[in-house]
Image (cartoon, grey):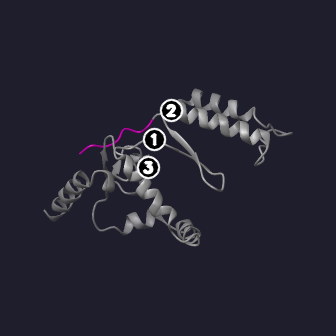
Amino acid sequence: MATQKNLQIDGNRLWDSLMEMAKIGPGVRGGNNRQTLTDEDAEGRKLFARWCEEAGMTVGVDQMGTMFARREGTDPDLYAWVEDRMCGFDPEVAPRVAEGLLDYDLAAEFAEAEVPIRAILGQTIPLNLEGNRELRPDFDAIVMEGCGHYPMLERPEEFNQHLVAYIEELGR
């Protein structure tokens, strides 16, 4: 069973990036003051976009000014399909969904599960295997290499093979 190696953070690189961004719109007593639609906001956005593009991502901005950075997945048409589906919802739905997540207790859900838990996920989704195993020692994961955020849509045959194999394993 494949598991994803924890991503490593280069602490020095992260600190240097934070310090570079902090130079833009410094606050009087520390921190930052990059208010929306100011020159400092534009400069910070330009820097963030440059970092994303250097990392091989495309950057977009929605009508509210929220920046989105993404790396191309295995199916270029999938992103447009998902974006269309997600943006086509009633705007009142998202806040209600988010409110429900505030009260979500993952530890309780893990404890109530009557079977071992196995996640099937794309490589781009962060996985904290050790943290999940603290909540549920039998937690396991299959990481679909080269797959993006929606493995069940990007590579449904492979995803279903993993799912069926797990169901069959549970039946033994």
Q: Tell me which amino acid carries mark 1.
A: Arg
- In front of the other: 65 or 31: 65
Counting residues from the start of the chain, the first of labels 2 and 1 encountered is 2
Tell me if mark 2 has few (under 14), some (14-19) or many (20+) residues whose alpha carbon lies within 10 angstroms of its own.
few
Magenta range is 1-7
Q: Main secondary structure of the magenta part?
A: loop
Residue tagged 1: 71
Is residue 3 found inside the magenta-colored segment of the image?
A: yes
Helix, strand or loop at mark 1: loop
Above or below, 164 against 5 in this view is: below
What is the number of the mark on residue 18? Answer: none
Q: CA distance from mark 1 to mark 3?
A: 26 Å
Above or below, 22 against 100 in this view is: above
Identify the residue at horizontal 58%, vertical 28% (top origin): 13
Identify the residue at horizontal 13%, vertical 62% (top origin): 172
Q: CA distance from mark 3 to mark 2?
A: 27 Å
Quadrant for the N terminus in the image:
top left
Residue tagged 2: 55
Identify the residue at horizontal 63%, vertical 56% (top origin): 63
With 162 as the anchor, is 12 left or right in this view? right
Q: CA distance from mark 2 to mark 1?
A: 9 Å
Contact? badges 2 and 1 (CB < 8 Å): yes
